[in-house]
Image: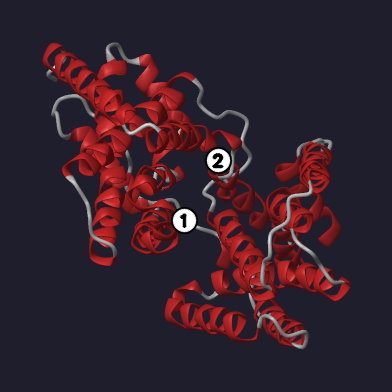
């Protein structure tokens, strides 16, 4: 029974013939070999590697467990006769294999290529991946008592920061992983099932504010999207500490580019095929949907940029009107490019929502913004040209809005 259940979930995640797995592993090998032969080396503390691997694996596993796309398969599987423990461990095992092999594997390949490792550390990193999968599943199974899971996760993070550089720390990870197994041993498959929200996200055309209600209702129904936005705000707070040592005010545009990496708000059409079909089917929706969507992403980006500028002013000082105008430009430009990508190149063929969050397309806009930021840092006069481009874009948006007021 456990083998059949695991095979059903594996085909869902890796494809009918598991074709996705060898392709992903091949890309990991290419990335590792390319970085290794380049000779690029970075000094990374052991506890930093443990924290990176554990946090990334647990985050992706949580996204996989929270995916609404799994609800259909879970509903069908839970309606069939099943043994409680076999079902839980086959489900968690397949999601864990998907997380480690298709997501964490790339990060592990990069770290393995650019830093020196001891044999015991390699074994320890594999143990950390398994531990992160089990702990994320255990915390998710008791998410009703969110304060317990939050305290448990906080204790593990503190333990990694204080003890992660010691070899015997992996024994602590092993014991904690066994504790997570005990929690899953007592769980059943229904704790992983999410009921569909009763709120719907219909886009009505009678009132101008309906799209804005849709955007905020969509975020309120996807708490992980709000969490990701909150994380970006925390990054905006601490980013000046890392950038101030580089080159003063000239690196501020780099901060704006980094803060444009807010994936969930930039995949609205990709993650909701029904909405995309409705928007493309109805007449005149290109302007009526894309312009409010662009302004929505702009406001989200601008909120992070404002926090970044305030944090920089408090820590370092020297913010000018030109820098504020630069924040408006980068927030607007990343919003425009994100909407254009969603409209012309939506992501297709994804299995679960985690595929959307970690799709390579997410790096296109931030990379373009980084290139612009680097050019603006090298040639400050270019920033004035970019601001003129911003004025032209705003004028075009206002013109379109006047032609399509509804």
The answer to the question of whether label 2 and label 1 lie on touching residues, with beta carbons closer than 8 A, is no
Residue nearer the viewer, 72 or 278: 278
- State the SS at label 1: loop
- Rendered image: mark on residue 195: 1
Residue nearer the viewer, 316 or 337: 316
- Rendered image: mark on residue 265: none
Identify the residue at horizontal 50%, vertical 26% (top origin).
Answer: 346
Identify the residue at horizontal 45%, vertical 79% (top origin).
Answer: 145
Check disc 2 and report the residue beneath it.
Answer: 356
Vertical order, 315 against 75 (above or below): below
State the image coordinates of residue 92 (x, y, percent, origin top left).
Answer: 70, 63
State the image coordinates of residue 342 (x, y, percent, origin top left).
Answer: 44, 27
Which residue lies most toward the right here?
119
Task: Report the colour scheme.
Answer: secondary structure
Residue 233 located left or right of residue 318: right
Spatial CA distance of label 2 from label 1 is: 21 Å
In front: label 2 or label 1: 2
Residue 263 located left or right of residue 230: right
Give the position of the N terminus as an image quadrant.
Answer: bottom right
Residue 233 located left or right of residue 95: left
Inspect this view and state whether residue 84 appears: no
Vertical order, 57 against 377 (above or below): below
State the image coordinates of residue 45 (x, y, percent, origin top left).
Answer: 67, 72
């Amino acid at each position: 029974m456990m083998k059949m259940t695991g095979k059903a979930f594996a085909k869902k995640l890796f494809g009918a013939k598991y074709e996705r797995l060898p392709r992903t592993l091949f890309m990991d090998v290419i990335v590792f070999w390319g970085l290794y032969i380049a000779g690029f080396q970075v000094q990374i503390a052991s506890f930093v590697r443990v924290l990176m691997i554990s946090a990334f694996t647990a985050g992706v596993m949580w996204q996989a467990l929270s995916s609404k796309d799994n609800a259909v398969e879970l509903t069908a599987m839970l309606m069939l006769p099943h043994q409680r423990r076999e079902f839980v461990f086959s489900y968690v095992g397949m999601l864990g294999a998907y997380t480690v092999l298709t997501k964490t594997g790339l990060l592990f390949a990069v770290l393995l290529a650019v830093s020196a490792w001891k044999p015991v550390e390699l074994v320890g990193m594999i143990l950390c991946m398994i531990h992160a999968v089990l702990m994320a599943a255990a915390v998710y199974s008791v998410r009703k008592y969110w304060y317990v899971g939050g305290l448990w996760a906080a204790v593990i993070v503190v333990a990694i920061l204080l003890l992660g550089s010691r070899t015997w720390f992996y024994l602590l990870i092993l014991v904690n992983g066994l504790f997570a197994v005990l929690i899953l041993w007592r769980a059943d498959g229904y704790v992983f099932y999410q009921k569909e929200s009763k709120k719907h996200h219909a886009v009505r055309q009678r009132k101008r504010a309906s799209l804005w209600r849709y955007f905020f209702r969509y975020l309120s129904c996807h708490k992980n999207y709000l969490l990701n936005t909150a994380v970006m705000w925390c990054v905006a707070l601490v980013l000046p500490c890392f950038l101030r040592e580089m080159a003063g005010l000239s690196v501020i545009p780099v901060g704006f580019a980094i803060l444009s990496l807010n994936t969930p708000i930039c995949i609205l059409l990709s993650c909701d095929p029904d909405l995309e079909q409705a928007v493309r089917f109805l007449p005149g929706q290109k302007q009526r949907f894309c312009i409010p969507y662009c302004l929505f992403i702009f406001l989200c980006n601008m909120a992070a940029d404002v926090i970044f500028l305030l944090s920089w002013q408090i820590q370092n000082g020297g913010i000018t009107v030109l820098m504020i105008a630069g924040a408006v430009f980068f927030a607007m430009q990343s919003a425009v490019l994100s909407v254009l990508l969603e409209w012309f190149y939506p992501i297709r063929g994804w299995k679960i929502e985690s595929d959307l969050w970690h799709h390579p397309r997410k790096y296109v806009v931030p990379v373009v913004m980084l290139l612009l930021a680097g050019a603006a840092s090298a040639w400050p006069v270019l920033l004035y040209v970019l601001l003129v481009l911003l004025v032209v874009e705003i004028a075009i948006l206002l013109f379109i809005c006047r032609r399509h007021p509804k």
